[in-house]
């Protein structure tokens, strides 16, 4: 088989995500691992070697979000694979005196096709407001990088029945910045209270929240085919099949269970069996 450059392949995949596949038909899932500030170079290489030893099912799109220093290992080791890699964050500024930041231009330059923006840890520890998150999403798109926009409510907001308003304001800020490019974002719904806690919402709660997000996106004019809403928060091999079968769930953003190739591969296999 001809070897096609992976960046081209990945970009094409991202553009093609959803073509002819409505959320309600659920033909394929994105299974993404957010490594946060974990892993060493050796562990990264070992993980990728193990992951590459398995065939990725046709109906699954795999993505890995490693720490910045390992992006080049991803680029090198995933060159001919159907596995995408992405950054965990991106600067809102274009370039200049911003010590510690990495710009969208730099990520685009190395061929990085996707970046997380607005992860709850960025929002709560580093002051990423909805407006800052929106600027990051915009900067990414300007460099042909797909933003995976993370949104989610705290337990207090859930219990106070304020979660819809919270999610809407997180989405609104990005829509204000992106306008009709909103449909180019992937959305990851991650209830803050489910991240790293082992607690997940009920399937009914996941269903109604994803449906709500779907409706908000439709309200912006995003077409059904472009909507991709991933669920994140304590996903593991024991619950992935149940969550995958929920309508409006188009994939997963996985933290802890994405750090070991074995459990990540099991999740990929189980998700592929549902769609
Ligand atoms: C995350 O932080 O994006 C996440 C989903 O973490 P975990 O799967 O460990 O809850």
Image (tube, rainbow, N blue to C red):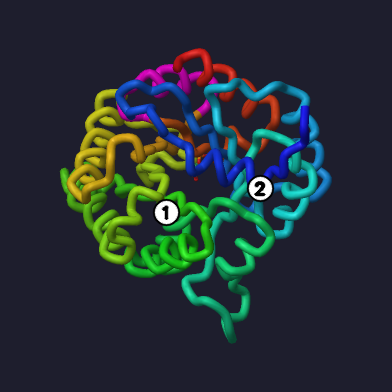
Q: How many C-alpha atoms fall within 10 Å of the one at disc 1: few (<14), some, or many (≥20)?
A: many
The answer to whether residue 144 is above or below residue 85 is below
Tell me where residue 68 sits by quadrant: bottom right
Mark 1 lies on a secondary structure that is helix
**Residue 4 visible to an observer of this rendering:** yes
Image mark for residue 120: 1
Tell me where residue 56 sits by quadrant: top right
Q: Is mark 1 within 8 Å of ligand 1?
A: yes
Identify which residue is drawn at 41% across, 43% down.
188
Q: Are marks 1 and 2 in contact (CB under 8 Å)?
A: no
Image mark for residue 225: none
> Does residue 45 belong to the magenta stretch?
no
Residue 64 coordinates in the image, percent (x, y): 62, 42
The answer to whether residue 21 is above or below residue 253 is above
Q: From this viewpoint, which residue is outermost toward the top? A: 273
Identify which residue is drawn at 28% across, 36% down.
224
Q: How many C-alpha atoms fall within 10 Å of the one at disc 2: few (<14), some, or many (≥20)?
A: many
**Residue 40 visible to an observer of this rendering:** no
Residue 179 coordinates in the image, percent (x, y): 28, 60
Q: How many marks?
A: 2
Q: Nearer the viewer, mark 1 or mark 2?
A: 2
Question: Seen in the image, is 117 located left or right of residue 167?
Answer: right
Q: From this viewpoint, which residue is outermost toward the right? A: 42
Identify which residue is drawn at 65% across, 37% down.
83
> Does residue 244 belong to the magenta stretch?
yes
Marks 1 and 2, the one that precedes in the sequence: 2
Q: Quadrant of the N terminus?
A: top right
Residue 157 coordinates in the image, percent (x, y): 23, 49
What span is colored magenta in the figure? 236-249
Predominant secondary structure, magenta span:
loop
Would you name the residue on which mark 2 appears? 7
Residue 41 coordinates in the image, percent (x, y): 80, 50
């Amino acid at each position: 088989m001809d070897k096609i450059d992976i960046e081209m392949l990945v970009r094409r995949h991202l553009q093609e995500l959803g073509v002819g596949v409505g959320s309600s038909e659920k033909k394929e899932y994105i299974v993404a691992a957010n490594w946060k500030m974990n892993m060493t170079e050796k562990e990264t290489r070992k993980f990728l070697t193990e992951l590459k030893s398995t065939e990725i099912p046709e109906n699954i799109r795999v993505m890995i979000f490693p720490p910045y220093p390992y992006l080049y290992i991803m680029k090198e080791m995933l060159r001919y694979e159907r596995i995408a890699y992405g950054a965990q964050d991106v600067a809102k500024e274009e370039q200049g005196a911003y010590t510690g930041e990495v710009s969208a231009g730099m990520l685009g330059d190395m061929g990085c096709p996707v970046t997380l923006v607005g992860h709850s840890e960025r929002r709560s520890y580093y002051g990423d407001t909805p407006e800052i998150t929106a600027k990051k999403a915009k900067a990414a798109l300007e460099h042909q990088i797909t933003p995976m926009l993370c949104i989610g409510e705290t337990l207090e907001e859930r219990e106070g029945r304020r979660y819809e308003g919270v999610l809407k304001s997180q989405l609104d800020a990005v829509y204000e910045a992106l306008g009709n490019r909103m449909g180019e974002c992937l959305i990851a719904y991650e209830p803050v209270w489910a991240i790293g806690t082992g607690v997940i919402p009920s399937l009914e709660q996941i269903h109604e929240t994803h449906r709500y997000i779907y409706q908000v996106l439709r309200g912006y004019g995003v077409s059904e085919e472009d909507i991709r809403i991933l669920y994140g928060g304590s996903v593991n091999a024991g619950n992935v099949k149940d969550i995958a079968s929920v309508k409006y769930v188009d994939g997963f953003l996985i933290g802890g269970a994405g750090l070991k190739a074995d459990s990540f591969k099991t999740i990929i296999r189980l998700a592929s069996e549902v769609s």
